[in-house]
Amino acid sequence: MSIDVTTWKAFAAAHAPDFTRTVFLPGLVTDPRHLSRLIDDGLRTATRRAPGDLRLRAFRPGAFDYRLTQRFITTPPADDESATAWLARTADSDEACVAVNDIASWNLSLGTEVARIVEGLVADRQHELPSGTDVYTFVAHSGWTPFGIHKDGEPSLIFHLGPSPKEVWVWHDHPFDASGITPSPSFGRITFDIEEHLGSAERHLLRPGDFLLIPQDTYHVFRNLGPSTFLGLTLYPVRTRSLITEALWRAARPAEPLAPYPPAHHVTDRARALLHDNTALAERVTDQLDLAQLRLRTNGYLSPPHRAALPAAAPAPDALLRWSRPGAVAAHPDGTVLVTRGRTLTVPHRTDFTALEKATASTAPFTLDELAASLPATLPADSRTELAHALHTTGAVTAA
């Protein structure tokens, strides 16, 4: 694991899940260069194999830049090129910067590393992350945060990877006069009058490996002191309405979609039809909610790996594999659906996968044939082989 586990466990015990005060942990990341390289590889995969799916935004001071965003998306990093070198090569200014959301979905190893970090926050199982986590990265060279002093609607967990240090100022207790604040739908309320307010803030200098927690709705701003990358986590609070609405829609399985612009009564008719059989529908909605949580848990509460990050070919017959993480596979209670690293697989008939779920905690290597042989004997031989390949192509097992 790329962080100091003892320190992280102590942090989680003291501050999760509320994260109500700023916490600075120097040297938490034991190998920041390793995490940086995984981010570099994720950016290469995304821009080379599926650039249209990459959630990237490029900024200049005070502005989101559409043309520069397009330039980054269509200019992949070279082999072994770091994110900071890519930024310097692609941008035409030291003050340009890049933010990328869901970066962990583009590299299996990065997703595994971050899932371990997130699991440390929910290890007591007294609280979870039913709406998931965003794993993002910010690559910059110099200058202030492009959107000024701002606050976020969720706590921000920042793992600074360097190579240069970064300054952070944090303000508590809503210190700004409303006359100097501009409402912003993306960043709450912001101000670009930065330097005149620094004297009232708490300052931190982040060196490579340092960690900073910024609580929800807490004003802050960064200043870059040279080329650097950080890894950030946004832990989403539960979005009850959207979770239940999505589960209701999936459970109902409407046979025909509505027209793009239907008469309004078609919408109410559809709602009436969905809710007609309350008892049976409630059970189906519960099943869908359970399934959605299994998707999150099997990938450590992160978005599932993007297809571009998954292996396209079967491993060699003698290649050694291992489970990507404990709990990478889980079975739905009905035994006909297997969830593997955020994706669902159907099986021919009801099957007991208890032994398979327990096996994911093992660190012993195995071949693909050995994996197939270990799957439930109640499945036909060809189904076991097919399932073993699926576990590999969904990232549940990786190269040892």
Image (cartoon, helix red, strand yellow):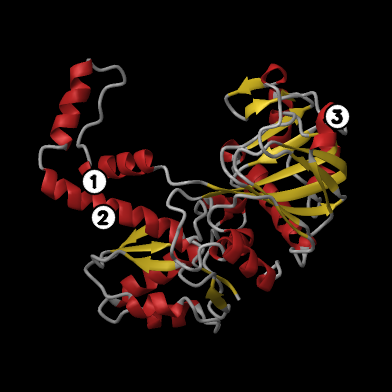
The mark that comes first in sequence, 3 or 2, is 3
Q: What element carries label 3?
A: helix
Quadrant in which the N terminus appears: bottom right
The mark that comes first in sequence, 1 or 3, is 3
Residue, x 37% and y 39% (percent of image)? Answer: 242
Cα–Cα gap, marks 1 and 3: 53 Å
- The reply to whether dot 1 and dot 2 touch (C-beta < 8 Å) is yes
What residue does disc 1 label? 251
Observer-side mark, 3 or 2, equals 3
Q: Quadrant of residue 243?
A: top left
The x and y percentages for residue 157 are 65, 51
Look at the image and tell me whether residue 342 can be seen: no
The mark that comes first in sequence, 1 or 2, is 1
- Height in image: 139 above or below 290? above
What residue does disc 2 label? 287
Residue, x 77% and y 34% (percent of image)? Answer: 145
Cα–Cα gap, marks 1 and 2: 8 Å
Say what amino acid the circle numbered 1 marks.
Ala
Say what amino acid the circle numbered 2 marks.
Asp
- Height in image: 363 above or below 220? below
- Height in image: 298 above or below 282? below
Say what amino acid the circle numbered 3 marks.
Glu
Q: Is mark 1 on a helix, strand or loop?
A: helix
Q: Is residue 115 left or right of residue 252?
A: right
Residue, x 62% and y 39% (percent of image)? Answer: 51
The x and y percentages for residue 172 are 69, 39
- Height in image: 278 above or below 269? below
Q: Is residue 374 left or right of residue 300?
A: left
What residue does disc 3 label? 195
The x and y percentages for residue 284 are 21, 51
